[in-house]
Image (cartoon, grey):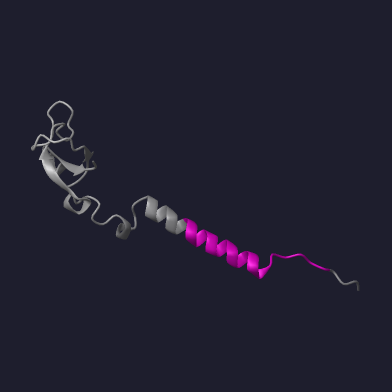
Amino acid sequence: MANKKSQSISLNTIIIAIIALVVLIVLILVFTGKIKMFGEGVDNCVQRGGSCENADSRTKRCPTIPPDGGQEVYATYKNTECDKDGKTQVCCVRIL
């Protein structure tokens, strides 16, 4: 009988494929929000360094003129505790 050399997938290739599949599954879970440990505290305005302020009635954003009349610039964050449950406030974080 003649020796037949068969070709097969090496063990290293199988291990690399399994590791890549596990990494892909973890990334999908993280980006779809199924793993909460990466998103904890994101909806907390104070942890972002901001405060809940009354939104401008026209733009639904942070007031354009700061209370002290200065030149600060604020970013408006939505989906925080400031605007949940029908509240009319927004999270304002000073950026300049």
Residue 78 vs residue 18, the one in the foreground = 78
Q: Is residue 52 above or below residue 61?
A: below
Residue 13 visible in the picture: yes
Q: Is residue 42 above or below residue 37?
A: above
Where is residue 80 shown, x and y percent of the image? 19, 46
Q: Is residue 8 above or below residue 29?
A: below
Q: Is residue 16 magenta?
A: yes
Residue at x 19%, y 50% (from the top left corner): 49
In the rendered structure, which segment of residues is drawn in magenta? 5-24
Q: Is residue 83 magenta?
A: no
Q: In the image, 65: left or right of 37?
A: left
Residue extending furthest top?
58
Residue 87 visible in the picture: no
Residue 80 vs residue 21, the one in the foreground = 80
Q: In the image, 40: left or right of 52?
A: right
Q: How many badges with numbers are in the image?
A: 0
Residue at x 59%, y 67% (from the top left corner): 15
Where is residue 39 shown, x and y percent of the image? 29, 54
Q: Main secondary structure of the magenta part?
A: helix
Where is residue 24 shown, x and y percent of the image? 48, 56
Q: Is residue 62 above or below residue 32?
A: above
Residue extending furthest front?
70
> Which corner quadrant holds the C terminus?
top left
Residue at x 14%, y 46% (from the top left corner): 51
Q: In the image, 80: left or right of 9?
A: left
Q: Quadrant of residue 70?
A: top left
Residue at x 23%, y 55% (from the top left corner): 41
